[in-house]
Image: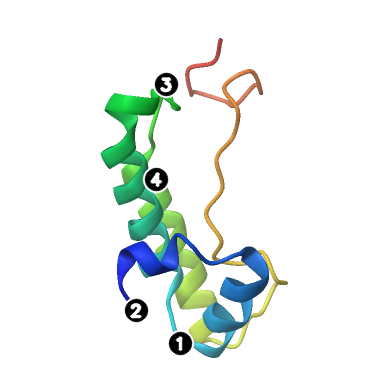
Amino acid sequence: MADSDLTKLTISELAPKIRSGEVSPVEVTEAALAKAERLQPTLNSFITLLHDQAISQAKEQEAALSRGEYRGPLQGIPIGIKDNIATGGIRTT
């Protein structure tokens, strides 16, 4: 599935694809990051993009799923956290 297609799917559409292995959390995260990075100069939506951390966590979820450890429909779905939410070690406003 093309990256642009992945970013157009809803969570309800993505979740079963991730659970079944049709797409991986890493693929979804890479697609979301690529879109965020591409649009950032125009939209200025993020003060911090945690590319390495996001990919690392996606790999952890992919490994868990491959071991049969299903944790719910949000497993492997990347999210953005508004910068006014306190997050340890990450810049906030």
Select label 2 or label 1 by which is in front.
Answer: 2
x and y, in percent, of residue 61 in the image: 51, 68
x and y, in percent, of residue 79 in the image: 56, 48
Query: Quick check: marks 4 and 3 in contact, CB under 8 Å?
Result: no
Relative height, residue 21 to residue 42 (above, below): below
In this view, the residue in front, 21 or 34, is 34
Query: Quick check: marks 4 and 2 in contact, CB under 8 Å?
Result: no
Select label 4 or label 3 by which is in front.
Answer: 3
In this view, the residue in front, 80 or 52, is 80
Query: Quick check: marks 2 and 1 in contact, CB under 8 Å?
Result: yes
CA distance separating discs 4 and 3: 15 Å
CA distance separating discs 3 and 1: 32 Å
Q: Earlier in the sequence, mark 4 or mark 2?
A: 2
Q: Amino acid at mark 3?
A: Ile
- Label placed on residue 22: 1
CA distance separating discs 1 and 4: 23 Å
Q: Earlier in the sequence, mark 3 or mark 1?
A: 1
- Label placed on residue 1: 2
x and y, in percent, of residue 66 in the image: 49, 86
Q: Is residue 45 left or right of residue 18?
A: left
Identify residue for label 3. 47
Q: Amino acid at mark 2?
A: Met
